[in-house]
């Protein structure tokens, strides 16, 4: 069996006013070609198919066109919901399984048997994004932590593939120690919900993960994040993109690099930089650009500079930020406007997990913040 593992499509993603669907379309065309050239039997999509829970029509069209084209070539598709997807929207794809080789799993099933699909000699166990709410509903042991519940559920899935010749786990989860694309701070906060790699049962011949956008192998050779299909936002600038071709019988995983329609660039213009020289450099950039202009706020030419940048870059300028340079009293003003990390984390948690930050985690977070602050002062 030849599998192709892809993930994190984020259809409908926008950067500023720029819609990224043409980048996704460009990637999906390559995926279709790879499926043909490599004689793929099963396509695995590890979640975050859409960027938003209510996708626009154009994005829906793009995905349906892709799925139907894969189907007409006789390839099976197995897809799961990611944290960006709406469970109910992906649920509406389940009916496709009756008329096409498209098998959708919208949320973790109460009975793990219902999240298993057999295709030829392989058995695929699916774990759509386990939100705290859903996993708590499944697991009665309320005193267990989120990660313990997920680990337990993974065990139950592994039990279902015991007798399989070949088995695959398709999951949208965060694994501890995974290299994320955003800031390191986010990574360490995210680890409250990160599953330990050793909690992934060894029963699976291959583990196809989604969630983290950087292509990577997790410790053992059989656990992979395939990563997003294009550079989704500026935290992924400079990052190469891949899909994984998996030959189960040969125990071989072959990452295939994707071509990018538009690279993302971040250009920082310092106060001492020659602005005109930067402008002419920008002329040659093919991609989408974020410009950070360091400036003294008393500089009266900011709006002229912005206009120059817009003239040179046109639609390629998707983000423009002004960064005031530090003045003598900068440290004082920083202290008085100290970031409220606790409320920032609460917002992050609500957005990511779609529920309130539990009191015990909040306590732990404040604890860690306190420790970090203490260490910063003693260092
Ligand atoms: Mn994602």
Image (tube, grey):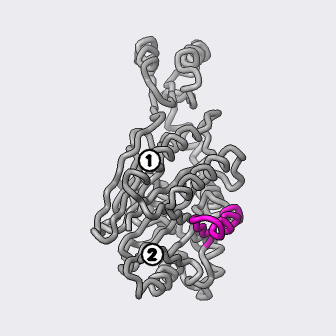
From what the image shows, is residue 103 above or below residue 226?
below
Q: Residue 144 is drawn in which quadrant? A: bottom right
Mark toward the start of the polypeptide (2 vs 1): 1
Q: Which mark is residue 33?
A: 1
Distance from mark 1 CB to nearest ligand 1 atom below 8 Å = no
Q: Which mark is residue 123?
A: none
The reply to whether residue 272 is in sight is no
**Badge 1: how crowded within 10 Å, few (<14), some, or many (20+)?**
few
Residue 339 x, y percent position in the rendering: 58, 48
Q: Is residue 306 magenta?
A: no
| Image: magenta residue range | 88-107
Q: Is residue 95 magenta?
A: yes
Identify the residue at horizontal 59%, vertical 41% (top origin).
21
Left or right, 103 with respect to 236, comes to right
The reply to whether residue 278 is in sight is yes
User: Could you say which is closer to the camera, residue 378 or residue 94?
Assistant: 94
Residue at mark 2: 120
- Quadrant containing the N terminus in the rendered view: bottom left
Residue 343 x, y percent position in the rendering: 63, 56
From what the image shows, is residue 328 above or below residue 377?
above
**Badge 2: how crowded within 10 Å, few (<14), some, or many (20+)?**
few
In contact (CB < 8 Å): disc 2 and disc 1: no
Q: Secondary structure at mark 1?
A: helix
Q: Residue 321 is drawn in which quadrant? A: top right
């Amino acid at each position: 069996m030849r599998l192709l593992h892809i993930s994190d499509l984020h259809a409908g993603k926008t950067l500023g006013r720029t819609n990224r669907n043409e980048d996704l379309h460009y990637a999906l065309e390559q995926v279709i070609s790879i499926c043909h050239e490599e004689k793929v039997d099963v396509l695995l999509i590890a979640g975050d198919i859409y960027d938003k829970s209510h996708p626009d029509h154009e994005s829906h069209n793009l995905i349906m066109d892709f799925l139907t084209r894969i189907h007409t070539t006789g390839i099976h598709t197995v897809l799961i919901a990611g944290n960006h997807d709406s469970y109910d929207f992906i649920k509406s794809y389940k009916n496709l399984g009756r008329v096409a080789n498209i098998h959708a799993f919208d949320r973790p099933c109460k009975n793990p048997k219902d999240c298993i699909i057999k295709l030829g000699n392989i058995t695929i166990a699916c774990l759509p994004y386990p939100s705290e709410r859903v996993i708590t509903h499944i697991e009665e042991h309320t005193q267990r932590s989120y990660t313990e519940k997920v680990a337990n559920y993974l065990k139950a899935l592994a039990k279902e593939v015991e007798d399989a010749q070949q088995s695959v786990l398709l999951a949208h989860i965060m694994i501890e120690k995974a290299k994320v694309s955003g800031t390191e701070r986010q990574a360490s906060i995210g680890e409250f919900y990160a599953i330990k790699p050793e909690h992934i049962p060894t029963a699976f011949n291959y583990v196809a993960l989604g969630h983290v956008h950087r292509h990577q192998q997790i410790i053992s050779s059989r656990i992979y994040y395939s990563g997003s299909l294009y550079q989704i936002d500026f935290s992924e600038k400079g990052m190469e993109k891949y899909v994984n071709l998996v030959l189960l019988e040969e125990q071989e995983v072959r990452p295939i690099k994707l071509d990018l329609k538009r690279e993302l660039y971040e250009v920082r213009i310092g106060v001492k930089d020659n602005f005109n020289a930067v402008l002419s450099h920008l002329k040659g950039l093919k991609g989408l650009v974020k410009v950070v202009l360091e400036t003294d706020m008393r500089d009266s030419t900011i709006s002229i500079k912005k206009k120059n940048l817009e003239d040179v870059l046109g639609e390629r300028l998707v983000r423009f930020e002004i960064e005031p340079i530090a003045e003598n009293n900068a440290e004082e003003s920083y202290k008085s406007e100290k970031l409220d990390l606790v409320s920032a984390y609460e917002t992050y948690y609500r957005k990511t997990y779609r529920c309130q930050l539990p009191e015990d985690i909040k306590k732990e977070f404040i604890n860690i913040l306190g420790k970090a602050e203490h260490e910063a002062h003693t260092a």
